[in-house]
Structures are given as C-alpha cells and as structure tokens.
Image (cartoon, rainbow, N blue to C red):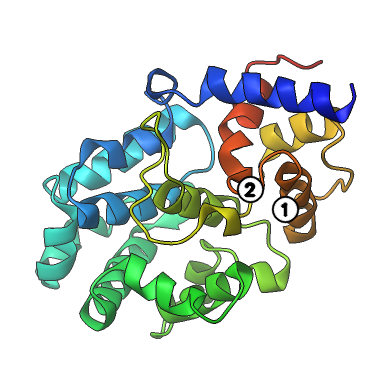
Amino acid sequence: MNDHELKLYLDDLFLRYNRRDFIDDDPISIPHMFSDSGDIEISAFLTSLISWGQRKTILKNALSLMKMMEHTPKSFIINASNNDYNHFRKFVHRTFNGEDCVYIFKAIKNIYNEYGSLGNCFSTFVNNNPIPVAMSLFRQKLFSQSCQPRTTKHLGDPLKNSGCKRFNMFLRWMIRKDQAGVDFGIWDISPALLYCPLDVHTGRTARLLGLLRRQQDDWKAVEELTISLQEFDKKDPVKYDFALFGAGVNGLLK
C-alpha cells in the first residue's frame, strides 16, 4: 500500500484499539485504578517494570503489589519503614525479586524527597536534553544508591542501545494526552518527543507494514520505527503503539 493508504490503515487501527474497553487486560489498567497523580505515576512505574511475560501474570503480580501497599502507593512509598518492606522480600515476578522491589521503593522515595515526584525528576532532565539522554539520566538517578548489578537490568538505557520497551511504555502513559482516556498525560512534556515502545508484537506488525527494516529490537530499531510513525503524525507519533500492538496480538496481519 502507498503512504496515504498506510496512514488510513494506521488511523483505523488507532481508533479500533485506542479505547478504554481494550485496556481491561492491559498493564495500563493498574494505574487506572487511581486518581491521585502520585498514585498513578508510582503504580504505573512499578507495573511497567514487571511488564514482560504473560499479561495475566503481569496483572496478577501488579495487583498483588498494590494490595501489599494497601492501594495507596504514594503514601506507602513516602512513609514506609524498614519493617514495612519485609513482606515484599518474597515478591517475585520472573527475574524481578523482592530485593529489587525494596530497592526500587527506596529509590522512588529518594526521588520524591529530592524532586517531589517522578514527573518533576524526569522533566528536569528533559529541559536541556533529548529524551534518550533524559532517560539515561533518570535511570542513573534511580540507581544512584548502591545496589546489585542485576537490579539495574530492570530498566533499560537507550544510550547503551537497549530497546527500553517498558521505559518507553511508561513514558507514553505519563506524557501522551489521550481524549479516549487510555493514556494519562499528567506530565507536562510534549508527546512529539516520545519514542514508540517496541516489543515482539509491535515489531512484527511494523515490519509487515514496511515501517521497520531493522531485525533487532534495540534502540536503533526504536528510532527507525518512531521516525516512520512521525511521517503520519509528527505531534503524536506513538499514538499508533496500541494499534500496532493490538494488530500484532490479534493476528490481523499474516
């Protein structure tokens, strides 16, 4: 199909999948449980960190985290004592374990103490830097305290050519303003700066549509895909993320 036909097809997929009734079994449904911006961004960040594997298991374990925090993630993070962390030490989601969980809690608390929110912290780094550099600086801040090297593997670094699927997904949730009520748009950063989250489903669909040639799902592929999507909407290129993912999961393209 030509560029005009491809845009029409992508816009149709966007309208089909970028809807609240499509997200009930998606990880973004977890932060949609909350209305306070702090609860939203913290629950979203924690959920994004464990968003790999079967969606049913992701949702189960994310809900378990919220329950253990008594469904008040911001209050828990800010006020938790060392004793409060003990029942999280047995938490496991694939390779993300209780030690990782407790470290992330403490790191978020440090960011809140210094910046007031995750959004303020990230915005500070975006002010004079492109998004990939801001992502790397945010990651450095998160892991600025001593921790096991394995813990740092749960958040990718674009400057090290990581695909950063979960990181980009979290940023999409926080930054992209969505009239359909899917993404939150609670961080005052332009969605035009975002990069498209890339996973096996999105990558497969993008390659079938000729939007992506690179075979590895790394940062270079993320850049290539995002540039392709900018041709269809420069102000909001990642609006097509849900469309590409949904089409891939549901096998619309063979």
Q: Residue 186, which numbered label?
A: none
Q: Residues within 10 Å of mark 2 (few under 14, many from 20)?
A: many
Q: Residues within 10 Å of mark 1 (few under 14, many from 20)?
A: many
Give SS at disc 2: loop
Give SS at disc 1: helix
In the picture, the quarter occupied by the C terminus is top right
Tell me which corner region of the image, top left, top right, bottom left or bottom right, holds residue 85: bottom left
Tell me which corner region of the image, top left, top right, bottom left or bottom right, holds residue 135: bottom right
Q: Residue at x 48, y 78 (%)?
A: 125
Residue 152 vs 145, above or below: the answer is above
**Image x and y of residue 58, in percent:** 42, 37
Residue contact between numbered discs 2 and 1, judged by CB atoms under 8 Å: yes
Horizontal side of 90 relative to 189 (left or right) equals left
- The CA span between labels 2 and 1 is 6 Å
Horizontal side of 227 relative to 152 (left or right) equals right
Q: Earlier in the sequence, mark 2 or mark 1?
A: 2
Q: Residue at x 20, y 42 (%)?
A: 34
The residue identified by callout 1 is 222
Q: Amino acid at mark 1?
A: Val
Q: How many marks?
A: 2
| Residue 90 appears in the picture as rendered | no
Please state which of residues 93 and 169 is positioned toward the viewer in this rendering: 169
Please state which of residues 159 and 155 is positioned toward the viewer in this rendering: 159
**Image x and y of residue 242, in percent:** 56, 32
Q: Amino acid at mark 2?
A: Cys
**Image x and y of residue 42, in percent:** 29, 56
Q: Residue at x 41, y 40 (%)?
A: 183
**Image x and y of residue 108, in percent:** 30, 70
Residue 14 vs 142, above or below: the answer is above
Tell me which corner region of the image, top left, top right, bottom left or bottom right, holds residue 60: top left
The residue identified by callout 2 is 196
